[in-house]
Structures are given as C-alpha cells and as structure tokens.
Image (tube, rainbow, N blue to C red):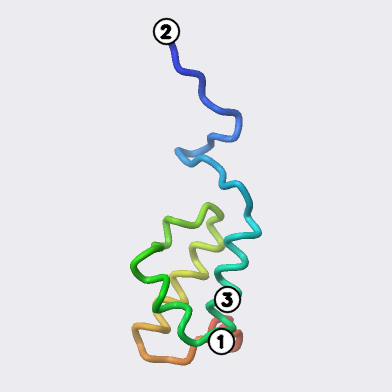
Amino acid sequence: MNAQVPDDFENGKLSPQTCEFEEAVLGAILIEKEAISETLDLLSPNSFYIDQQQIIYKSLLKLFDACQPIDILTATE
C-alpha cells in the first residue's frame, strides 16, 4: 500500500495553514523590541515555509546577534 502524498507537498515541505501567520511573526519582531528574544528557542529560519521569509528571519537574527536595532530600516539594509 502506497501512502498518498498531499497535493501541497512540495520540495519536502508541507505548506502551512496560513502564510499570513509567518508575516505576522516577522511584523511583531519589527514592531516589538523584545519579540525576537521570545522566538529564539521556538523558531529557526527553517520554521518559515516561504523562502523570502526565511531570509528575512535570518537577517533579523544577524541584527540581534550583532546587538543592532531591529526595525524596518535596519532590516531592509
């Protein structure tokens, strides 16, 4: 008996329930100074389904590690 692969299974990833949730997490990090420290133990860049959002989260982590401010200006640089 072969297991059936879901239609939204692509590149080894199963799509999340909502991509807007990922956007909300990134938005919260950009708005609230302490939000990123709350995500460190919970999320990794691979937690994000959308590749661009993985890149954004990696950038925010680099800013955090460098003790730089995390906001829309520093994130877009």
| Residue under pointer 3 | 28
| Residue under pointer 1 | 71
Q: Earlier in the sequence, mark 3 or mark 2?
A: 2
Q: Report x, y in % for residue 63.
A: 42, 84
| Amino acid type for the residue under numbered disc 2 | Met
Q: Earlier in the sequence, mark 1 or mark 3?
A: 3
Q: Disc 3 on helix, strand or loop?
A: helix
Q: Are the residues tagged 1 and 2 within 8 Å (C-beta)?
A: no
Residue lying farthest top?
A: 1
Q: Report x, y in % for residue 42.
A: 38, 63
Within 10 Å of disc 1 (Cα), the crowding (few <14, some 14-19, many 20+) is some
| Amino acid type for the residue under numbered disc 1 | Asp
Residue sitting at 63 percent across and 51 percent down? 18
Please tell me whether residue 62 is drawn above or below residue 21 in the rendered image: below
Mark 1 vs mark 3, CA separation in Å: 10 Å
Within 10 Å of disc 2 (Cα), the crowding (few <14, some 14-19, many 20+) is few
Mark 1 vs mark 2, CA separation in Å: 51 Å
| Residue under pointer 2 | 1
| Label number found at residue 26 | none
Query: Quadrant where the C terminus lies?
Result: bottom right
Please tell me whether residue 18 is drawn above or below residue 70 in the rendered image: above
